[in-house]
Image (spheres, helix red, strand yellow):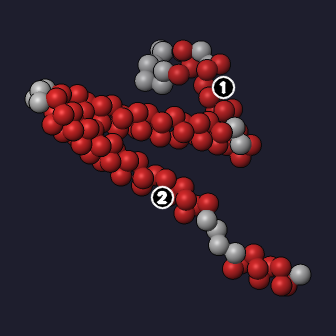
Amino acid sequence: MDNQTQEEEYKPRVKPIIEAVDGLSLGISMVVAVAMGITLGYLLRSMTGIGWTYFIGVFIGIAAAGLNVFKAYSKQKKLYEDLAKEPRYAIKKELDEKKNNKEDDDLDYGEKNY
């Protein structure tokens, strides 16, 4: 039994590291998406000889970066919703329900009735 607990202590815990790197990779992916768009625009301009095709690539890169942000936001929102369903955070749900059930008169503490 002692050998098993020692193995668990020395066992690398990779999941938190991967989650942290995933959060850092958002900034890197935005820069890479815009750089790839600029490269695509440059290639379009050099192949066609039309100057405004460069901006098509730039806009594609910016759109790809925006899509990366949206995907990261959706992922974090899903994780937050899953976290909110855990039983240890049930008190927040109870407080929200109590707040919604109260009448408007009970919520206004600044008004005095004489």
* Residue 99 quadrant: top right
Q: Residue at x 47, y 40 (%)?
A: 72
Quarter of the image with the N terminus in it: bottom right
Q: Which residue is mark 1?
A: 97
Residue 86 location, x and y as percent?
A: 71, 42
Q: Which residue is mark 2?
A: 21
Is 113 on the left-hand or right-hand side of 5?
left
Rate crowding at label 1 as few (under 14), some (14 to 19) or many (20 or more) other CA atoms within 10 Å: few
Residue 47 location, x and y as percent?
A: 18, 34
Q: Is residue 94 above or below residue 27?
A: above
Which residue type does callout 1 highlight? Answer: Glu
Which residue type does callout 2 highlight? Answer: Val
Rate crowding at label 2 as few (under 14), some (14 to 19) or many (20 or more) other CA atoms within 10 Å: few
Of discs 1 and 2, which sits in the foreground?
Answer: 2
39 or 29, nearer to the observer: 39
Q: Residue at x 32, y 48 (%)?
A: 32
Residue 58 location, x and y as percent?
A: 23, 34
83 or 28, nearer to the observer: 28
19 or 77, nearer to the observer: 19
Q: CA distance from mark 1 to mark 2?
A: 37 Å
Q: Which badge, 1 or 2, comes first in the chain's sequence?
A: 2
* Residue 37 quadrant: top left
Q: Residue at x 64, y 43 (%)?
A: 83
